[in-house]
Image (spheres, rainbow, N blue to C red):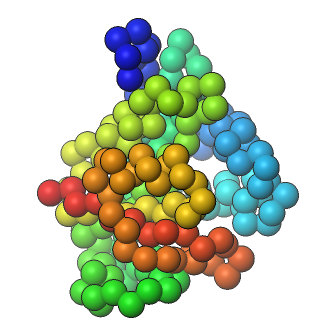
Amino acid sequence: MTASTPIPTFDRLNATELHQYRDELLAVYTEVYAEQLDTPFFSVPRYWDRLVAYASRDGFSAVVGRLDNQLIGYALGYTLPPGSRWWSGLRDDVDPALLVEDGRRTFALNEIMVREAFRRRGYARQLHDALLAGRSEERATLLVLPNNAPARSAYLSWNWYGLGELQPFNDAPVYDAMLLDLE
């Protein structure tokens, strides 16, 4: 980010407020995933169903960023519950101890999106940091498409590391699962 890059404002949303921002959040999603929207997994209704499910989880939090009252992007996630199925689609052999969830161990960063016009200015990192600030979990996890080189590079530069390939649903793509130590 340069000295001339405007500084956005960030607001934290709870589950109820997420519904109030529905149209704006879906507009960002539609822009970011425009080329994939006709794939069932990436359809707008299926995405909104996922957001509603995330918002119903303990530890849910969302952060929206604005510049001059315009939504530039958002990030959201929740705490993985005890016995979470999050890791059930993992395709690589890893230490089983890494996959144990107790409802306090891992924050799942489900989404981080920045509209095209606001990319490459450091806003994704600011959304990321605002969402993870003050979290009580010891680590965070996220899934990133292997061919999303800009996102993968960013996460690696922010100290995330790879755990293995994971397919969260039968009709979902295979993602790279990553972890970040929060403590």
Image position of 1 with respect to 92: above or below: above
Left or right side of 95 for 113: right
Image quadrant containing the C terminus: bottom left
Residue 171 location (% of width, % of height) = 71, 77
Based on the displayed image, in which of its 4 quarters is residue 11 positioned? top left
Query: Going by the picture, which residue comes out furthest to the top?
Result: 4
**Quarter-of-image position of residue 27:** top right
Q: Position of residue 162 (x, y in %)?
A: 37, 68
Residue reaching furthest right? 38
* Whole-percent x, y for residue 119 in the image: 55, 31
Q: Residue at x 63, y 25 (%)?
A: 117
Identify the residue at horizontal 28%, vertical 53% (top origin): 159
Residue 154, image x, y percentages: 42, 46
Q: Is residue 149 visible?
A: yes
Q: Residue at x 77, y 45 (%)?
A: 34
168 to 91, vertically: above or below:
above
